[in-house]
Each structure stands twice: as C-alpha cells, then as structure tokens.
Image (cartoon, rainbow, N blue to C red):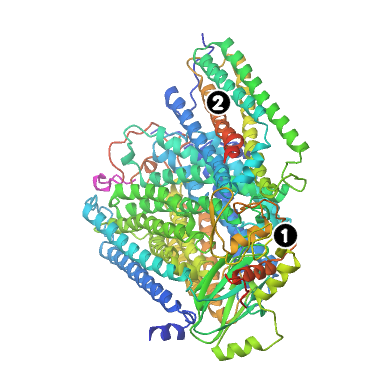
Amino acid sequence: MWPQVTQALRLVPEQASTVAGQVDALFLFLVAITVFFTGLIFLLVVVFALKYRRRSDDERPKAIHGSLVLEAFWTVVPLGIALAIFVWGTYLYYVISRPPAAAMEIYVVGKQWMWKLQHPTGQREINELHVPVNRPVRLTMTSEDVIHSFYVPAFRIKADVVPGKYTSTWFEATKTGEYHLFCAEYCGTSHAVMGGRIVVMEPAEYERWLTGGASAESLPAAGEALFARLACNTCHKSDGSGRGPSLVGKFGKTERLASGETVVVDESYVRESILNPQAKITTGYPPIMPTFKGLVTEDQLLQLIAYIKSLKMDGQAKP
Amino acid sequence: MSDAPHEPRQHYLNCDYSVRSWLLTTDHKRIGILYLVSISAFFVLGGVMAGLLRLELLTPHGDLVQAETYNKFFTMHGITMIFFFLIPSIPAVLGNFLVPIMIGARDLAFPKINLLSWYVYTLGAAFTVVAMVTGGVDTGWTFYTPYSSTYANTNVILTALGVFITGFSSILTGLNFVVTIHKMRAPGLTWFRLPLFIWAHYATALIMLLGTPVVAITILLVALERGLGIGIFDPAIGGDPVLFQHLFWFYSHPAVYIMILPSMGVMSELVACFSRKRVFGYAFVAGSSMAIAVLGFLVWGHHMFVSSQSMYAGIIFSLLSFLVAIPSAVKVFNWTATMYKGSISLQTPMLYAFGFVGLFTIGGLTGLFLATLAVDVHVHDTYFVVAHFHYIMVGGAIMGFLGGLHFWWPKITGRMYPDAWGRLAAVILFVGFNMTFFPQFVLGFLGMPRRYHVYPPEFQMLNVLSTAGAVILGLGYVLPALYLAWSIFKGKPAGDNPWGATGLEWHTPSPPPTFNFEQTPVVREEAYAYDSQLEGHRV
Amino acid sequence: MSEHSAQVAHQFDDATQQYEASTLGMWAFLITEIMFFGGLFAGFFVYILGHAAAFAEGSRHLDLALGTVNTLVLLGSSLTMALAVRGAQRGDRRGQVLFLVLTIILGVAFLGIKGLEYAHKFEQHLVPGPLFRMEGPHAQSAQLFFSFYFAMTGVHALHMIVGVGLLAWLLVNALRGRYSAEYFTPVEVSGLYWHFVDVVWIFLFPTLYLVARHV
C-alpha cells in the first residue's frame, strides 16, 4: 500500500525493477530516522526555550558540566543505528553490484552527447533500449570521450561510464512501460539532453521487436568478420599453430603473463590487448603483436569481444 | 573628573583613517574587516549566479540562457561560493578578528603573513574574475577529467590558477592559527579552558594545512595537462581519469569540514551565552571537533561510489562515513543539553543558532542517506545531493556565520543593530531557505539529475516552489546588509559587554584598542563560567 | 659580539616565544609541503602498479650518473647549511658567510645539472606532449612516467630556486652582522626549509631513478 501512496503523491519514481522496492524501503527507514531525530531536537529546543526563557537579567543558572552516562548513551545509540543502516545498505549494494549468471548482455557506449546501445543479436539503438520484462540484463559500458553516467531512476541504478575502461551494472525490469534514461555525470554543453528511454516489453513483444526492422548482424558474427578483415586470424589460429595463442575457450580463464603475474581474460583485458598489446603478454609468446589503436572504434572493440566470448572449446562461434 | 573636553577613545578603527593604513595594516582586526568586504562581494556574485540558475529552472525548457551559459553559471556559482566565500568566511573574518583576543594575545603569531594571505586571496580572486568575464568556465567546480583536461573549450587554466593561488591564502591562515593557539595563550589559559570557538578553529586550521596542498597539486596537474599537452589523466596513454577524482576529493571532502567546523565553534559560543550556561560536555564538544578533522580525511571515496571504484573500497568508505557523522550528532545533543535549565534569551544571534541546529540536523542526517551505498547509487548526482549540501553549507555554515556576525558585531564596530530587524531577517531566511531547498530532496529522489538546465516537465512544480523560496531567501540576505550597514553610522553605541557574555573578548572595550588589551589578561577559570559571574558584572 | 639585541616583534612577549613560534611556523609549513609532494608521489605509485614495465623503461632513460652526482651535491649542501646555522648560533660572521656562500654554490650547481638533464631529455624527444617519441613497445605509457618525472623534479627545482633566493637574502643580512647567539631564527628556519627540500630529493631520486628500474 505504501508504494502506491508515495507514488501517487509523486514522492518516489515508479518502482520498475527487482531492487527498486528494496531501495525504497531502506530510503523510507532513513526518512523515519531523520524525521524522528529532527523532531526530537526541534521539540527539545522549543520546550527548553519556552520553559527556561529568561525572566530576569540577574538569572544565573547553576552550572551543569556534563554527564558521562548521557555522552555514552547518545554516542552509542546513534552509532548502533548508523551501523544498522550501513549493514542494510551494504547488503543491498552487494545485490545491486552482482548480476545473476544468466543475464542478457547489452553493450553501451556513451559519447558526447548520446548513448549507443547494442544488443548481442545485432540491433543497435541510439538513446533507447528495448528490453523484455522479468529478464536480468547486464550492461557492459564504456565512453568514447569524457566520463558520463548511465542512470535509470525507475530501476534505481546508476553507473559511471569511463573512457579507457569497461564498467558494468545490471537490472531486471519488473513492469512494462517506458522509463527515463538520464546522463548523470556532467559532460559538457548538452549534458542535460543526453538522455532517452528504456522501453520494457512483454517477452513476445520483445521478440517481435527484435525481428522487426532491418535484419542486423549479431555482435559475435560482426566480430568474426572483423577478426578476419583485420587479419587477427593469421596469428591467432584456432588450432594454436599460429604465432599468437588460440583464443578458443580463453575468455573468462586465468592466464599467466610473461612477467609472472596472472590475469583474468575479461572484457578489459581483451580491449587492452588489442590497443596496447605489449602491456600484458601471455607467457611463452613473443611480443610482436601490433597495436590496433586508431584502427578500431569502441563499437568494433565490443564486437570483437563478443566474438571472442563466443568461442567455446569446440572452436565454433556461438550466435 | 576634570572639565577638559572628552577625548574620543582611540581604538583600532579610528587610530588611522587613511587608505594606506588599511591596505598595509598588520592588525588582525583590520585584516578581518578586509576579508569581510571581499567575501561579501563574492557572496553577492555567487548569489546572483544562483538567482539566474533558479530563474532558468522555472520552466522545463532552456528559455533564459543557452546550455553552455547555464553550465558556466553553475560552475561559477560553485567556485565563487566555495573558494571565495565559504572557505574563508568564518576563519578569515571572525577567526582573524577573535582568535588573538579570545586567547589574550596582542595579535596573531605572524601579522605580516596574515596580510599576505589577504593579498594572495585577492590575487587568486582576480585571476578567477578575469576568467569569468573573458568567457567563463563550464567544467563544474569539480573539474572532472578528461572533460576539464582535454575537452572543455573554456577558461579552465585561468580558473585553475586562480583557485590554486587562493589555496595558499587558506594555508597561510591555517598556519597562523595553529602557531598562535599553540604558543600565544595568555597566562592561565590551558587547552581545556579555551573557548570552543578556538578548538573549532584549531581543528579547521589543521585541515587547511593538510588538505589544501593536495588540491593545489591536483589542479596544477590539470592545468599542466591542458596547457602543455602532457597526459596524466589521459586514458589514451594509460592515464586514469578516476585518479583525478581521488586526488580532488581527498581535499574537497575535508574542505566541507573547513566550511562547517568554524560554524560549530560559533554555535558553542552562542548557545552558552544565550542560555547563560556552560556548554554541556565541553570536553566532548572539543574532542568531537578533532575527531571530525581526523575522520574527515578518511571518507573521500563516498563521492565515488558509482565511479568504477571497487566495491570493497566503497564499503570501507561507507562505514567510515557513518562514523564521521557521530561526532556531529554528539555536538547537537550537547548544545541542546546546554539549554536545559538555562536562562534562554531569544535575541538575534540565538535565533540563528536555532536555525543552525534545525537545518544542520536535517542536512547531517541526509548525509546518512548518501553514505548508504544502495541509496547513494540512486541519488548520487541528483538534486538530493544538492539539497543535502545546501542544508549544511547554507542552513549550517551561513547561519553560523550570520549568527556570529550578529553576536560580535557590537565588539567589531562598537555599535548595536536593531534587534527586531535582526530577528525578522533570521525568520525570513529560515523560511526562505526551507522553501528553496526542501523540494530539492524530493526532486532528487524522483530522479532529477543535477547540472541540468532543462528537465522533464513532471519536475516543474517542485522547481517553481524552489525558485519562489529562493526569492524569499534573497530578500532575507538583503536585510542584514542594510541594517548592519545602517548601524555603523546610526546604531546605538555598544558597551564592552552588551550580551553579558564570558570570554576575554568581552573584557576589553568595543571596539577594541589596536593591541587588544591594556594589560595581558590572566585567566583563572574555565570557559563559560556564567555561574560564577558576579552580580552587576555586566556593563 | 652581537651588533644589537634581538628584536622582539610586538605580538610576542619575549624572544623565546618569538623563536618558538617561528620554528613551529616553519614546521607547519613543511608539513603542507609534504602533502603537496605527497599528492605527486601518490599518483606516481598508483600508476607504477599498473604500468611497471613502461615505467622501468622510462626510468632507464634517465641519467643515473647525473642524478647521483646531484644527490651528493645536495647532501653536501645540507652539510654546509647546517654549518651556516651553527655559525649563526655562535655569532661567527665569517663562518656564516662562508657556509652560506658554499650552500648557494652547491644549490646552483644542482640546478645547473638538472638543467643539463632537462636539455638532454629535450634532445631525446622525451618531453611529454606532442613532440614525445620513444622507441619500443612501452612508448605509450612511458610518456606517463616522464610526465611525473618533469612534474616532480620541476616542482622540486622551483622549491630549490626559492631556497637559493632565501639564502641570498640571509647572506646579505649575515654580511651586515644581523645574526648572533641572541637572534639567529631566520637562519635556523631557512635551514629547516633547505633540509626539507633535500629530503624531498632523497625520496625523489630512488623513486624516479632506482625503484622504477627494478620493478
């Protein structure tokens, strides 16, 4: 009932994700604490100001130096409340930060002043994202220029989008409808209009939307084509006979580097290896890979990553 | 008494009226007044910027100014208010004036460095004003890279240099306070007999010394990156734009404590005087200032929860941020307890004190919302944050500054202002303030991001409410400017101690002589010894 | 024999209070300098973690010989500075002047050698910015190393220049016989500053010239 009341009074945005209600509950608790303590102090100040108002100029109230008991009380009790809020908030934050395993991947590139979104099946969107309801969606994001921030109030999620690295967040929408997408990190002149909408649809409708429009190449397929066009496959042969390592089944594994350290082969490592190949070379291979900096865009990097992700042990690319 | 014509008493104001004597003064009291004039001018400038912002936000569309102009306005509003008004305000005006007198000294330890700090402030201000009038800067006061270092097309370097230079003014003031408080206390004035105003300024000075140099070097690096094309925060050569945020917030979080601690010091003085009682839990209030100074350096990452900072770092910063709230809560409880069984008088300074308590409590508690990781993800970079820090900075710091100004005005000028007007202004400010900023909490939770000059139409009603409040707030600020100025010429002459307060500053004439005391005072009792004030002691 | 008794500024009760306040003031200022350089060191150490090989490569391009000579020069200047302070404390005018002059010479020598190093870097196209060029696979990130090298040694050199200026002013006053056992505070306080600038170099040298090479 309470969500309806607060939404009717438009004090909170729509609750359209699995975490929204939980965030609002924590928020409400914080509001209650604030109202309580503000009210308490206000009451005490008003009562004391009236009850002990100065009646004559000669008044000299007795000194009260303090009370160790009171100091302990009003230190420990607020500390206890603070720690309770901390634990609750941290737990919820942990949930917000950890996408479920089977989440649908969407790739996001922010740039001044628009959002470019790619579905794994190839559909590209600008400033809009269509997703099915009740399905976890994981966003892997980067920026082409300055720091932006991907913010959907109705889902209670936000994550900065940083040039030179990948950041990610996730959500599971629980209500169909359209919701604001805002850029929430000041990024220059048109920061305020760098927004759009998230369109949450019933699954069937989403499938129809996917197949509608011009047929697009899936991300892994586009990546495979690029892999060949840029001649990556001449060194990174899938049977390991080339001058570079085979990339089959490599994504997600831990690799040992020439320097002795280990690294997990994730999106960031793949991106770095394409743009700055000498930075982290796998042990046993010569440092001869040329850099592709300036030769691939952020979108193309995401296609290559999607392709490499799809290379399972049987050597076949998955769509 | 002889029949000789009565010679007007010589004091620090009338000893020399020449402009040269003011511009080359080393008298801490005059330097305080120089700062008062400077920061007031910048308050007006920053306030005008704010007015323009609120005017634009009356409608969802960008109909008053272009986007880039709006972006320059909010940047300049932030830079002006933070670096040229709030950070100097209480320390450079009231601190400079009162610290030596409150500890029974003739001046600060380094009077020439004190004057230098004002000139350094003025030089930095000049750079910044030139930057503003020759095109402005649109990076936000936070100068995030790589926008500020590579992409912005505005006067970033000039502004960065202005802020860099002004930082040294802060460092010099802090240095002076630390040495003065350590080495120049009057005989008998031990640490635990010091007024809490002094403790607050000591803690503030420590933060000024330790924090300011870090933002100085950070902003210098941004200027170098921009001017010489060297890449430090440039991802293309492996630089990390988020490193800028760490370095920037390492100072800028403690900076907010520079802005609030002096106000808290004022609060202790006001509550004690207008309750005519010792501050309850003196040692705890003193200790809490030091605790805030220390803990304040450990929480900077709470500005970066969604910045791609690691989740584990976020958890640690969140915990520490909750801890830093506790000493502030302790102060509020102790001030309230001071009023218990006191003798409460509701003159203007006390009304400002009440305003502070209410607004700082709300502002501080909304800080807990931001320290809570899961909630901050939603409200970070929205109007919720804007409302939170204005509650503390305006509702807290500025109320404290005005309260202090009204309390010590008779000491500084030798004149009283009309208390009825003072109380009216305080009430108008309180009402106007809440009307301006409370709707912004709601706007923020509804999802309106900050630094937006256009917004979805459903946010309009709350924005209109906020702008209406801003008009009332502005009017509220005009009133003290008028009656305080009036009082300099026409106000009733104040005696040495119009409030019947304790404290060494009230045991010397109003206005004080140039060297503060005829004879160095000797201190024999604790601060706020109201209960042992002799009958008829009040002049 | 001192020319005149110590002058106590009006805000101080006595010469002792003035002396204590002045030295505390300089220590407080030096702490701000630690924070100032600290920001640069913090940034450097954050980057070396992620770019170890590139930073090692960059460090190898620094002139270890010149850096070592400079370290010895600066250490020597701290010795002569300490002797100058001692001269002031004993009212030994000849000693003060001699050692102040020696310190200034060593300080200028340091700056000269630094200038030489900078000139070499310029010739080798190792100054960050549009003209930067370096062979090898780590060129991209090594530029970061050189940005820090120039920022850190440049800021240090600025502090040295200020220090030499301070020493020149002290020299003028020493020649006039201003310092004696009753009043040597400016010399002592400038000595503190000079030693601090030396200590910063003691951290800078291994960080830039040695540590980075051996990661």
- How many residues crowd mark 2 within 10 Å: few (<14), some (14–19), many (20+)? some
| 2 or 1: mark nearer the eye | 1
- What is the magenta range? B528-539
- Could you confirm whether marks 2 and 1 are on the same chain? no
Tell which subunit mark 1 falls on: A
Name the side, left or right, on which A46 lies relative to B296.
Answer: left
Name the side, left or right, on which B261 lies relative to C172.
Answer: left
Residue displayed at 76% across by 38% down: C124
Position above or below: A202 against C198:
below
- How many residues crowd mark 1 within 10 Å: few (<14), some (14–19), many (20+)? some
Q: Main secondary structure of the magenta part?
A: loop
The reply to whether the C-beta atoms of the residues labelled 2 and 1 are less than 8 Å apart is no
Give the amino acid at mark 1: Phe
Distance CA(mark 2)–CA(mark 1): 54 Å
| x, y percent for residue C115 | 71, 31
Disc number for residue A292: 1
Q: Quadrant of the N terminus of chain A?
A: bottom left
| x, y percent for residue B30 | 53, 41
Disc number for residue A256: none
Q: Does residue A191 appear in this view? A: no
Q: Quadrant of residue A234?
A: bottom right
Q: Secondary structure at mark 1?
A: loop
Task: Read off the residue under disc 2.
Answer: C190
| Count of numbered tags | 2
Q: Quadrant of residue C172?
A: top right
Tell which subunit mark 2 falls on: C
